[in-house]
């Protein structure tokens, strides 16, 4: 009896250049090519190569790995990267995405102390999204916690579904840290979910970015749902490999994350696989 053909998932799986830290942006392209990722998401940060469009283009061409997304410099350590003005940062991220052929700019909600930026953020992101074919996908964040204290560090909200945006990014390490019902947040995002950061976490105060399958988040269930629904955005492996004892161990983690992601994206096409035993460290 002939077996039914397996449908290849629509979503491409990319490697965030942040996943190789403390190694360089250039190393991320090399690893993505060697492991067979569909592309990379460039985290624009203090590495000069991540800020240089022509250098990124050369890496992309040399390794034959496309840049699928650009993560705007929204972190505390990147407050001076590409200007101190947050709107200039977004304009430069859009320009980089357009020049590199990336379809998405990932952006965090403003910090609460960026009062003017926060006040204009929702309207401003809509305005910028209307000026380009590049998606501005606003990412879910989390409250900052220390022991029994909680600080709301983002405005208008760390949960972008509380406001009206054209596109969202869901990050499963951030849902773990915020102790959010991940699938309920995905439901609120609906068809405006345009981008996924696949990672895992155990709900601690720390943003863990574990390899998917090593924490408590519904990584497999979300990926299978995306595969079943024909999600055509990008799924980006954004994990923390800083504790890897060697380059080989880092690469093994990134290979595992890629295999896990592709397995569960494809599971719906073959009637589901069941979730493999979760591995913890």
Image (cartoon, rainbow, N blue to C red):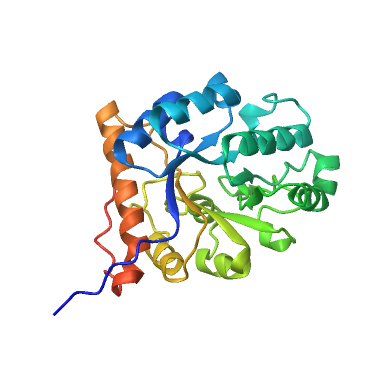
Residue at x 42% of width, y 36% of height: 65
Q: Is residue 22 visible?
A: no
Residue closest to the far left = 1
**Quadrant in which residue 254 is drawn:** top left
- Depth check: 266 or 121 in front? 266
Residue 253: horizontal and vertical position, in percent?
A: 30, 40
Q: Residue furthest bottom?
A: 1
Residue positioned 37% across, 52% down in the render: 212
**Image quarter hosting the C terminus:** top left
Q: Position of residue 72 (x, y in %)?
A: 64, 37
Image x and y of residue 158, in percent: 67, 52
Q: How many marks?
A: 0
**Closest to the observer, 156 or 189:** 189
**Do we see residue 39 in this rendering?**
yes
Residue drawn where x is 30% and y is 39% of the image? 35
Residue 198 appears left or right of 35: right
In the image, taking residue 50 as reference, residue 164 lies left or right, namely right
Q: Position of residue 114 (x, y in %)?
A: 79, 38
As drawn, 34 above or below 123:
above
* Whether residue 225 is situated above or below residue 212 in the rendered picture: below
Q: Nearer the viewer, residue 91 or 279?
A: 91
Q: Is residue 205 above or below residue 61?
A: below
Q: Quadrant of residue 32?
A: top left
The quarter in which the N terminus is drawn is: bottom left
Does residue 164 appear to the left or right of 52 in the view shown?
Answer: right
Identify the residue shown where x is 65% and y is 57%: 167
């Amino acid at each position: 009896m002939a077996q039914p053909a397996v449908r290849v998932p629509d979503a491409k799986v990319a490697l965030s250049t942040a996943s190789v830290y403390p190694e360089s942006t250039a190393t991320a392209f090399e690893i993505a090519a060697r492991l067979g990722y569909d592309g990379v998401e460039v985290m624009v940060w203090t590495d000069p190569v991540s800020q240089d469009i022509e250098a990124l283009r050369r890496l992309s061409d040399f390794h034959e790995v496309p840049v699928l997304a650009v993560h705007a410099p929204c972190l505390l350590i990147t407050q001076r990267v590409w200007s101190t003005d947050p709107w200039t940062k977004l304009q430069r991220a859009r320009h980089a995405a357009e020049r590199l052929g990336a379809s998405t700019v990932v952006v965090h909600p403003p910090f609460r102390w960026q009062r003017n930026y926060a006040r204009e953020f929702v309207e401003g992101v809509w305005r910028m999204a209307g000026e380009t074919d590049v998606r501005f996908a606003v990412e879910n964040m989390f409250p900052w916690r220390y022991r029994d204290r909680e600080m709301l560090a983002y405005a208008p909200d760390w949960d972008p579904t509380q406001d009206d945006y054209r596109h969202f990014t869901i990050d499963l390490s951030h849902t773990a840290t915020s102790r959010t019902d991940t699938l309920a947040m995905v439901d609120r995002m609906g068809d405006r979910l345009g981008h996924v950061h696949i990672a895992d976490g155990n709900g601690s105060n720390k943003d863990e970015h574990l390899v998917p399958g090593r924490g408590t988040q519904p990584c497999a269930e979300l990926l299978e749902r995306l595969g079943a629904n024909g999600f055509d955005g990008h799924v980006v492996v954004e994990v923390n490999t800083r504790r890897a004892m060697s380059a080989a161990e880092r690469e093994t983690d990134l290979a595992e994350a890629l295999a896990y992601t592709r397995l569960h994206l494809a599971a719906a096409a073959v009637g589901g696989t069941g979730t493999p035993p979760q591995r913890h460290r």
